Amino acid sequence: MRRVYFDHSATTPVHPEVASIMCEYLKEHFGNPTSLHYFGRKVRKDVEAARETVARAIGADPSEIVFTSGGTESDNMAIHGVAYANKNRGNHIITSAVEHHAVLNTVKALGKEGFSVTILPVDKHGLVSVEDVASAINDKTILITIMHANNEVGTIQPIAEIGKLARERKIIFHTDAVQSFGKIPVNVDELGVDLLSISGHKIYGPKGIGALYIRKGTRWRQTLFHGGAQERLRRAGTENVPGIIGLGKAVELAMAEMESESARLRQLTDRLIAEVTRLPYVELTGHPEKRLPGHASFVFRFIEGESMLLSLDMKGVAASSGSACTSGSLEPSHVLLAMGIPHEVAHGSIRITMGRDNTMEDIDYFLEVMPPIVERLRAMSPLDQETEFAMNSDCAACKVSASCSKVQP
Ligand code: PLP
């Protein structure tokens, strides 16, 4: 059976060149970078070269990069570090309703510790409004944390505009660039961010490695671990050398391929979106243009996303419903709900995220196997479809708008 991997936003396969170089650091170059002998010095030099590669890719200085265990740790470290270091200046944090849980739950936890939190709404495409950010700022605001691109719907936020505002108002600004980095240009000065999170396993690197950019001079303090002086006292613990080397290689490859790969993925995505949205009662979620290359997400009415996933899996197609962290739970995605998509419609969400191994033949295969699955699942749907379909058959909006109140059972 043909196997098609369409879940690159959950994780990517490790690039063969990444796997190969990592093996060298598991087998031969096993030294501890803190050691003064040859084995230590060799890996120290290579870890610093990887740091430089990561820094260069986002327009930063190597001293501003801290290696972490991934996007979740980077987000936690950024938010806690700024909140605790600036407690005497204020206690207000601004974020958005569509953040990954690594941000949302961290901010909510701070809310329980006495910080005041504003969670901004988004529009129907998942976009945060810059005006909303401006009006949420008060004299106690110490941090704005808004993601660069959304993991569930691919929407790209106006980070440069929010960055400009944050700079004018002298507020520290963090962005979670876990989904955007490696797919679209990410430059810390152009975006105007003070802290930025990235993760290795979303860009064909290994799992369990990531980085946090902290702009020089940012009021931030180490909050996670007590221990050694690694990472300039910003992250204690012996460095994950194979992971760091793998991340460095993944970043190097992503930068070399980004432009051509994004253009290729946009072609695949455009075709997929055009064909899928031709089907009745299917709608694209996220912004039609301001979205990540390779990212296509939909809601299929009268279908459970999980049932569709399982049926697709039986045909060899690996997709996802919402984010990998929330699929399997009965709660619909907080992102789709924040975009105003009704509860029952949000249950029918499917995310297709393409990557470097996908081809137009994969799209053809998906377009061949998906419609009969949709037909079968709709025929089995417990919803009173005859009434629903009859009620809405004349309503053009029902084919395109997920927020049509007439369709709600
Ligand atoms: N932030 C976003 C936007 C993500 O999509 C993810 C992972 O799905 C994370 C953070 C967490 O990253 P990691 O899996 O490296 O902890």
Image (spheres, rainbow, N blue to C red):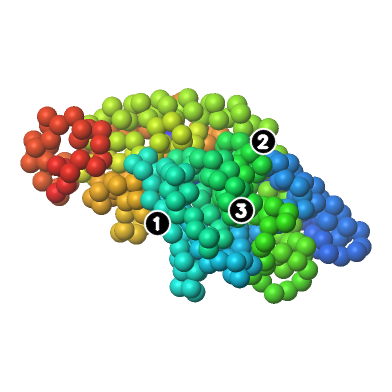
Q: Position of residue 256 (x, y in %)?
A: 68, 32
Q: Which mark is residue 170?
A: 3
**Is residue 345 in view?**
yes
- Give me the residue at 39% from left, 29% from top: 272
Q: Nearer the viewer, residue 150 or 37?
A: 150
Closer to the N terminus: mark 2 or mark 3?
Answer: 3
Q: Position of residue 153 (x, y in %)?
A: 41, 42
Q: Quadrant of the N terminus?
A: top left
Q: In this figure, which residue is indicated by the disc labeled 1? A: 326
Q: Nearer the viewer, residue 137 or 58?
A: 137
- Give me the residue at 11% from left, 41% from top: 388
Closer to the N terminus: mark 1 or mark 3?
Answer: 3
The crowding category of the residue bearing disc 1, from other C-alpha atoms within 10 Å (few below 14, some 14 to 19, many at least 20), is some
Q: In this figure, which residue is indicated by the disc labeled 2? A: 255
Whether disc 1's CB lies below 8 Å from ligand 1 is answered no
Judged by depth in the image, the label closer to the viewer, 2 or 3, is 3
Judged by depth in the image, the label closer to the viewer, 1 or 3, is 3
| Horizontal relation, residue 277 to residue 143: left or right | left
- Give me the residue at 77% from left, 53% from top: 63
Whether disc 2's CB lies below 8 Å from ligand 1 is answered no
- Give me the residue at 34% from left, 50% from top: 338
Whether 193 is drawn above or below 217: the answer is above
Q: Amino acid at mark 2?
A: Met
